[in-house]
Amino acid sequence: MTMKSLSLLAILSLLALTLPLAIASDPSPLQDFCVGVNTPADGVFVNGKFCKDPKLVSADDFFLAGLQNARAVANAVGSNVTAVNVNNLPGLNTLGISLVRIDYGVNGQNPPHTHPRATEILYVGHGTLFVGFVTSNGDGNRLFTKTLNMGDVFVFPEGLIHFQANVGRSPAVAFAALSSQNPGVVTIANTVFGSNPAIDPNVLARAFQLDPKLIMDLQAKF
Ligand SMILES: *[C@@H]1O[C@H](CO)[C@@H](O)[C@H](O)[C@H]1NC(C)=O
């Protein structure tokens, strides 16, 4: 054996030793929370869903139809997200992947939001979208944007705030894959100004450096 292959062997055996330690962590959660209880009778969730008896599984557990249909976009933001995740396609349980169809009206947008559990890779099926994401505070809150046309692909890293806006003259449609069976969505405006119950307007006034009256106007929209 040469010196080079010997040191490669040494690195590989070191890796083999350290790898099991490096991955000894809690599994990432598959829902917003899973409060522990001591008696199984009081529990409803595991981390994800219960598994169907394999003998009872059929092809339909892995199937969903209807994503060819455009959805209504006559709402405040002018877009409509159709999610395909473990909640309507049970075969996705434990597989770490899901899908959305997003329809955008003219001037419509998918407003700033994050997916707490997933990276998203988006494909433009029709139209022109201005898309972007912002890095976290420690990375300087950098904004990355791009104008996408039919056939273009863009990726939004896990957990970061991102958006898409239709800047074309016609309706647009995109499909996106997400790296979780249940990615979750935190729409910034809805969670901050539309929480239930409402966050004290004085708290938000200080946070956003705005008059509490303006905060109450924003809260009234939800
Ligand atoms: C999305 O589209 C469906 C079907 O067209 C419609 O029933 C639903 O109300 C729409 N959602 C929003 C938020 O506009």
Image (cartoon, rainbow, N blue to C red):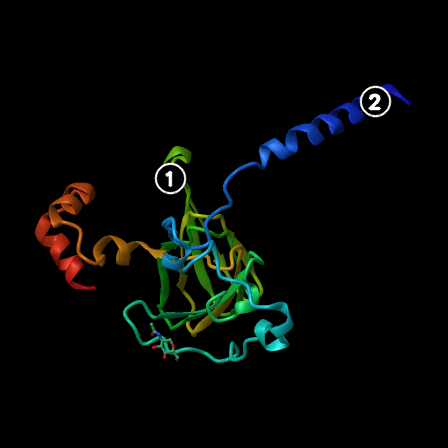
Q: Position of residue 55 (x, y in %)?
A: 64, 72
Q: Position of residue 99 (x, y in %)?
A: 52, 65
Residue that carries the numbered disc 1 in the rendered image: 141
**Image quarter hosting the N terminus:** top right
Closer to the camera in the image, 212 or 29: 29
Amino acid identity at mark 1? Asn
Is residue 72 visible to the viewer in this orientation of the structure? yes
Q: Secondary structure at mark 1?
A: loop
| Ligand 1 is within 8 Å of the C-beta of the residue at disc 1 | no
Residue 131 position (above or below residue 27): below
Q: Is residue 39 left or right of residue 26?
A: left
Q: Amino acid at mark 2?
A: Leu
On screen, 17 above or below 25?
above
Query: Residue 6 — which label?
Result: 2
Q: Residue at x 15, y 62 (%)?
A: 220
- Where is residue 177 shown, x and y percent of the image? 54, 61
Q: Quadrant of residue 113?
A: bottom left
